[in-house]
Amino acid sequence: MALILLRHTRPEGAEGLCYGRSDLAMAADFAAHAQRIAAQLPEVTRILTSPLSRCRRLAEAVAALRGLPVEIDAGLVEMDFGRWENRPWQAIPRDELDAWRDDFLAARPHGGESVQDLADRVGAALDAAAQGARPALLVTHAGVIKAARVALGQTDGWQSQIGFGEWMRIDTWR
């Protein structure tokens, strides 16, 4: 049975912004995108979501069409970027970005979560989701999906991209 990891739709004003835990408003076309996504997703028996509204609202839209409840899972929330939150990436000091690049897994120049912290949290959340009823839909964020890809052994997982409203299927988790 599968875990389906779905990235939220595009939030309003997100272009060029570091917004990990920031709870941004949804774009004006959210409802149309949510309907399209819900129609294209495979059948699931369970829906879990990050507590942030950009995920929760999408999970609720899918759940309403599927007749399923929504479970909030804090383990599926995006990385905490500390003082970088809600700042344009271009406004973040170069020396802080360089420190992050130089020790990507452990550095916390922003004062928030390290990438390793994110990876550990995501691994635990997916372990728990894999123990429940499946196939399960997990509505989450790009960072969470990248962490899952790395845990699955994808060597380019941290550099991978997943678009807004796109999903990936995991047939075997650990």
Image (tube, rainbow, N blue to C red):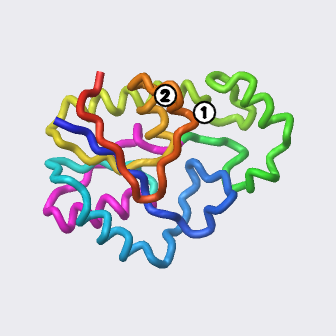
Mark 2, other Cα within 10 Å: few <14 / some 14–19 / many ≥20: many
Point out the image quarter for the C terminus.
top left
Helix or strand or loop: what does disc 1 sit on?
loop
The residue at 18%/42% (across/down) is 135
Res 143 seen here: yes
Task: Name which residue type carries label 2.
Answer: Ala
Q: Which residue is mark 1?
A: 113
Q: Quadrant of residue 76?
A: top left
- Label 1 and label 2: CA atoms lie apart by 10 Å
Which range of residues does the magenta coloring cover?
Answer: 53-78
Where 27 sits versus 105, above or below? below
Question: Residue 104: within the magenta?
Answer: no
Q: Tag count in the figure? A: 2
Asked if residue 68 lies in the magenta stretch, the reply is yes
Residue 149 horizontal/vertical position (percent): 43, 32
Reading the image, the residue beneath label 2 is 119
Q: Earlier in the sequence, mark 1 or mark 2?
A: 1
